[in-house]
Image (tube, rainbow, N blue to C red):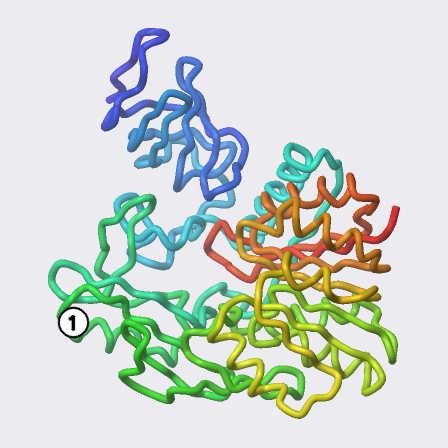
Amino acid sequence: MDAQLPTGERLQVGQQVTVDIEKIAHGGHCVARFEGQVIFVRYAIPGESALVEITAVNSKMARGDAISILTPSKYRRAAPCQYARPGGCGGCDFQHIELAHQRTLKAEVIVEQFSRLGGLELSCEVKEVAPEDGLHWRTRMDFAIGASGRIGLFGNRSNEVVEVEDCLIADAPMNVAALSSRRWNGDDRIEVASTSTGQVSVSRAGRSISGPTQLVEKVGGFTYQISPQSFWQAHKSAPSTLVAEVIAKLELKPGEVACDLYGGVGLFTAAMAKEVGPQGKVHLIEADRRAISDAQRIFKGAGNVEIHPGTVESRLPKISDPDVILLDPPRTGAGEEVVTVMARTHPRAIVYVSCDPASLARDAKLFLASGYKIDFLVGYDLFPQTQHVECVARFIPA
C-alpha cells in the first residue's frame, strides 16, 4: 500500500509509491516523478505504471526499484536470469525488456545525450550483434568473493556481493557453475577470460591459477597473443565487428600515416597497418605497461608500426601530420586537452570508438568547437541485457 507523502515532503528510503514511468535515462534506469520529486527507477519500462520502493535519496532526486508492475509494457518479458531483479545482481539492467526494444531505448539515450551534452540534434541506430538471444556473449568476467566464499557480483550501486550459481551472459566455456561450486579463501577477485581460440584462463590478484598465462585471440586473419589482464573487448563478436566498422570509416590509403590512440594491445593497429602498407605508418599510443608489452611482442618486426608508451596528450604532439586518427578511450572519454591536440594535427578524419554516449557527446561538442563536424554515428549492441552500448562516430573538418 502506498504511503502518500504530503506535497514537498522528501521521499524516504524504504518508502513505496505508485508512479507512471516516463522516459529512459542514461545509466540503466527510467525517470518517474512523485509529488514533484524525480525518481530514477530500475526494472521498469517507459509507459508502465509501477509500485516503486525508494532505495536512495539525496537533495536532487531519489532512486528506486520497481517491485510491482501495475500496467505492464508490451515489451516486458520474464528475465531469463534469477538474479536480474530488485536486490539481485547489478550486472544486467534490461533483462526484463525484449531485446529489440532494448536497442530502441539505447538509441534514445544516445540521441538524448548528444542533444543535452553535445548540443547536437541527430538520429542513431543501434545494431543487433549475434548471439540473437543476448546471452553467453561476455568473454571477460570479474567476480568478487561473497561472505560464504563463493563467487558473486556486486549489487547495483552497492558493495554487497550477491553470490551467484551461474551467469547467463558469461561465455559458456567459462563454466561459471563450476567456479561457483568452489569455496575461495580471501577477498581477491577472480578474473576469468575465454578466447576466440577456445582457451579459458582463471586469474587471481593478477596471477594465473588455471589455464594459459598468455591468451591467443584471432580477428580477421590477425593473431594477438596477450596477457589475461590486458584489455580486450568483452563481447565475443566485438573485435571483428568494430574492426570492420573502423576500417570502413577511416578509408585508409596506402602510404598514409595513422594514429591509434589508447591503442591497447593493437586490436585496430594490425588492420590499419595492412591498409597503409609498407610505405605507410601506424603510431600506437598506450599508457598501460602490460598492454604495451603485449603490443611490442605482437608487432615485433613490423616496420610500419611504431609503439609509443605514454599518455596521448604527451605523445601525440610529437607525431607530425597524421592523415587519420582512431581513438578508443576509456569510459571517461578523451577530454578537452586530447581533443585540442588532435584538432591541431589537422587529420582528414577522426574515428571515435566509445563505450559511453555521455562522454562521446561531451567530446563531440569539443570537436565542433575545434573546427570539426560529425558525419557518421552508429551504435552496436555489444552489451545486451545491460544499459551499455558501443558507438562509432566519425568527425571530419567542418
Look at the image and tell me whether residue 326 can be seen. yes
Taking depth in this image into account, of 344 and 108 the one nearest to the observer is: 344
Q: Would you name the residue on which mark 1 appears?
A: 184
Residue at the farthest top position: 7
Check disc 1 and report its element: helix, strand or loop. Answer: loop
Taking depth in this image into account, of 322 and 92 the one nearest to the observer is: 322
Look at the image and tell me whether residue 249 can be seen. no
Question: Looking at the image, which residue is at 21% across and 60% down?
Answer: 163
Callout 1 amino acid: Trp
Residue 337 placement (x, y as % from top left)? 65, 47
Question: Looking at the image, which residue is at 22% across and 71% down?
Answer: 180
- Rendering quarter of residue 278: bottom right
Residue 219 placement (x, y as % from top left)? 62, 82
Q: In the displayed structure, does residue 160 sit left or right of residue 263?
A: left
Indicate whether 50 appears above or below 212: above
- Rendering quarter of residue 158: top left
Question: Looking at the image, which residue is at 29% across and 49% down?
Answer: 155
Image quarter where the N terminus lies is top left
Residue 375 placement (x, y as % from top left)? 82, 51
